Image (cartoon, grey):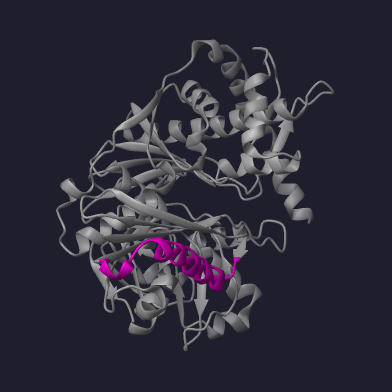
Amino acid sequence: MYLGIDLGTSSLKAVLVGGDGAIVAQAGAPLTLSSPRAQWNEQDPEAWWAALLAALGDLRAEHDLSGVRAIGLCGQMHGAVLLDDADRVLRPAILWNDGRAQAECAELEATELRSAAITGNRAMPGFTAPKLLWVRRHEPDIFARTARVLLPKDWLRLRLTGEVVSEMSDAAGTLWLDVGRRRWSDAMLSATGLTERHMPSLVEGSALSGRLRPVVAALLGLPVGCPVAGGAGDNAAGAVGLGCIAPGQAFLSLGTSGVIFTADAAFMPDPDRMVHAFCHALPNAWHRMSVILSAAASLSWIAASTGTDEATLLREIAAAPVAPRERLVFLPYLSGERTPHNDAAAAGVFFGLNTGHGRAAMGRAVLEGVGFGLGDGLDALEAGGGRIDALTVIGGGSRGALWLRILSTILHRRLSVVEGGDVRPALGAARLAMLAVNAGDARSVCSTPAEREVFEPDPALAEGLMFRRSVFRRLYPALRPIFAASVEAI
């Protein structure tokens, strides 16, 4: 058996995979987000460890883990875990959806004029490097004590193995990696007051990164010295779990954030459109992504804010008729936005509210607004890399048939759903573990799952969605200066 661990934002998931690649069992543990100030999002790394213990404890209660041959790790990208020279955590981890470092992005690109050329990406507040500039400016004592910086899943690796290691797909999201050359950039590190000694060593995602420490193995019921693969950032892991490894293959992830991911044979940066160009989890492979920061998070927010749960709200939305010329529109920028706007100051907005609108109408506007944001991202991806014909959908949002009909119509693409869509990143981590111990080659291990359900654009929805998308596209340009001015006033 093989174990895949996915450290997400709202939960940690773990899957046991048999030698045939099938999922044997899965477990999870919830995580909470701390937002001590506007635009701040943090988590305590110790909560990640507690979640790992809980999830593996649940697996161990039903399955003997002593036969696990290898472990793979994946997780939320961009988070900054700051450690002192004794590997003690210095402050809560600053997460991928944290927007405090907008000014530091401009500072970074002014300090290193080749930043976009080296990294293939524009500096965005969610990336790791601007966060360290923020810490240097606002928490200088902590910055001075920082001996190393790790990404979230790599901090778990340190706890599991004692090794300070990362891999290419996650490291590509730091803005410290020379993405085309797959190595740390001295120039980008220098621009944030760091050197390579602050960084973990690098391996490919399918390579061995370390072995389980005896004390941890005993705690978790796993074999002493169990190999741990390099693993991947969550989206690259999801791609491996879907078999999205050949150029042109693509998927849509409807998790906390929303991502459209396409695999590439070569490094294809497109920073002017705010497209992410990163290393894939396999050697000599890359990928591009468009990213919106609040996808399923927007649905969770509107359900909680209107006093219901997501399933109930989705049923109410499906039962409520909507006129083609309904103008209620939602901007899903609850945590700012990345593709194509790169604007941490952007905020969520309802436009067109009136006294006739209730919870169902607002909920539908949220579903559509996320779709319009994803549509902007798809346009950006295709402008720089050609048409994407179809998308497989993974993530918690893939369980909503109404939402998938809406998304298929907005994107004008065929969408397919597969079994286990919400654990594909964890499965991808397990597949990387298989590759690390030579349990097959990438083509055989990273198979493509069968489709469970297919959604095609719905002509009955098209007129109303086209009308509201036209409104949506005019709102952000009109509000951008107001977003910026309101943040400056805080």
Q: Is residue 181 visible?
A: no
Q: Is residue 129 visible?
A: yes
Q: Image quadrant for the C terminus?
A: bottom right
Query: What residue is at 21 percent from the left and 56 percent from the top?
Result: 283
Side (left or right) of 228 relative to 370: left
Q: Which of 427 and 349 is in front in this view?
A: 427
Residue 229: percent from left, percent from top: 28, 66
Q: Is residue 67 magenta?
A: yes
Based on the displayed image, in which of its 4 quarters is residue 244 positioned? top left
Residue 221: percent from left, percent from top: 36, 74
Query: What residue is at 39 percent from the left and 27 percent from the top?
Result: 453
Residue 289: percent from left, percent from top: 40, 44
Based on the displayed image, in which of its 4 quarters is residue 243 positioned? top left
Side (left or right) of 192 relative to 322: left
Query: What residue is at 65 percent from the left and 23 percent from the top?
Result: 471
Q: Is residue 426 magenta?
A: no
Side (left or right) of 197 relative to 8: left
* Residue 69 in the image: above or below residue 317: below
* Residue 290 in the image: above or below residue 351: below
Q: Image quadrant for the N terminus?
A: bottom left
| Secondary structure predominantly adopted by residues drawn in magenta | helix
Q: In this picture, which residue range is highlighted in magenta? A: 43-68
* Residue 316 in the image: above or below residue 240: above
The residue most toward the front is 62
Query: What residue is at 54 percent from the left and 28 percent from the top?
Result: 403
How many numbered markers are drawn? 0
